[in-house]
Image (tube, rainbow, N blue to C red):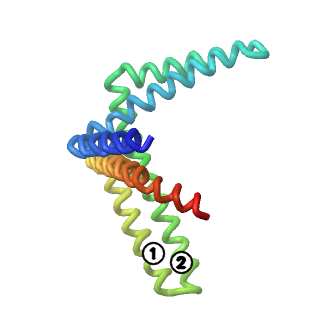
C-alpha cells in the first residue's frame, strides 16, 4: 500500500508539473468537466423520472438538462463561453469577498483599529483584483490554471509524505 501511495503521489506531482506548464489548458478543461457533469445530471434526472411515480415533467427537465450538457460538452463556442463565465464568476466571488472584508473591517474597528484597517485594505485590494478578473478573463483563466496546478503538485507531495509518515503513525498508535 505504501508503494502504491508513493507512486500515486509521484504521478500526481508530475501531472501537476505538466499542468503548471499549460495553465490555460487546465482551466479550459473545466468547461469539459462541467459539460460532462451537466450531461450526467440530465441522464440521472431522466432515469429518476421513471422511478416511483412516473413524472413526465421531470423526464422533460432531464432531457433539457442533458441537451444543455451536451451543447457545452460538444460545442467549442459554448464550452469557451462557459469557461469565460467561470472566470467571471471567480472575479465576482472575489469582489463579494472584498465587500465582505470591508464590512467586517468597518464593524471590527471598535475592537481593533489595526485589524479593521487591515481588513478594509484587503477588501479594497480584493475588489480591485476581482474587477481585473472580470475585465480580463483570459488572464484570470491562466492564473486559476496555475493555482490548480500548484494544488495538484502539493497533493502529490502530500501523498508521498503521508506514505512515509504512515509507518511512524502506525507505530505510535501501537505503542499507545
Label 2: few (<14), some or many (≥20) within 10 Å?
some
Q: Which residue is located at x 47 percent, y 23 percent? A: 69
| Residue to which mark 1 is pinned | 120
Q: CA distance from mark 2 to mark 1?
A: 7 Å
Q: Residue placed at 78% from the left, 16% from the top?
A: 52
Q: Looking at the image, which is closer to me, 157 or 88? A: 157
Q: Is residue 135 visible?
A: no
Seen from the viewer's position, the closer of residues 172 and 116 is 172
Residue 96 seen in the figure: yes
- Residue 151 at what x, y percent from top left? 36, 50
Q: Residue 89, image x and y in percent?
A: 43, 46
**Where the N terminus falls, by quadrant?**
top left
- At a point 57% along the width and 18% down the height, the residue shown is 43
- Picture disc at residue 156: none
- Whether label 2 touches label 1, CB < 8 Å: yes
Front residue (pair 129, 175): 175
Furthest toward the front, the residue is: 175
Q: Earlier in the sequence, mark 2 or mark 1?
A: 2
In the rendered image, which quarter is residue 9 located in? top left
Q: Which residue is mark 2?
A: 106
Vertical position of residue 40 compared to residue 115: above or below: above
Amino acid at each position: 500500500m505504501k508503494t502504491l501511495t508513493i507512486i500515486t503521489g509521484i504521478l500526481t506531482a508530475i501531472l501537476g508539473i505538466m499542468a503548471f506548464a499549460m495553465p490555460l489548458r487546465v482551466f479550459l478543461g473545466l468547461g469539459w468537466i462541467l459539460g460532462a457533469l451537466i450531461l450526467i445530471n440530465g441522464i440521472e434526472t431522466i432515469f429518476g423520472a421513471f422511478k416511483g411515480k412516473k413524472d413526465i415533467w421531470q423526464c422533460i427537465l432531464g432531457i433539457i438538462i442533458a441537451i444543455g450538457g451536451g451543447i457545452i460538452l460538444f460545442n467549442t463556442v459554448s464550452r469557451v463561453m462557459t469557461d469565460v463565465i467561470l472566470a467571471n464568476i471567480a472575479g465576482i466571488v472575489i469582489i463579494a469577498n472584498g465587500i465582505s472584508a470591508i464590512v467586517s473591517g468597518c464593524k471590527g474597528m471598535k475592537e481593533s483599529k489595526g485589524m479593521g484597517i487591515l481588513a478594509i485594505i484587503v477588501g479594497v485590494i480584493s475588489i480591485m483584483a476581482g474587477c481585473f478578473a472580470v475585465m480580463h478573463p483570459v488572464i484570470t483563466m491562466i492564473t486559476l490554471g496555475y493555482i490548480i496546478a500548484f494544488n495538484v503538485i502539493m497533493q502529490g507531495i502530500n501523498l508521498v509524505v503521508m506514505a512515509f509518515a504512515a509507518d511512524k503513525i502506525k507505530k505510535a498508535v501501537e505503542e499507545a
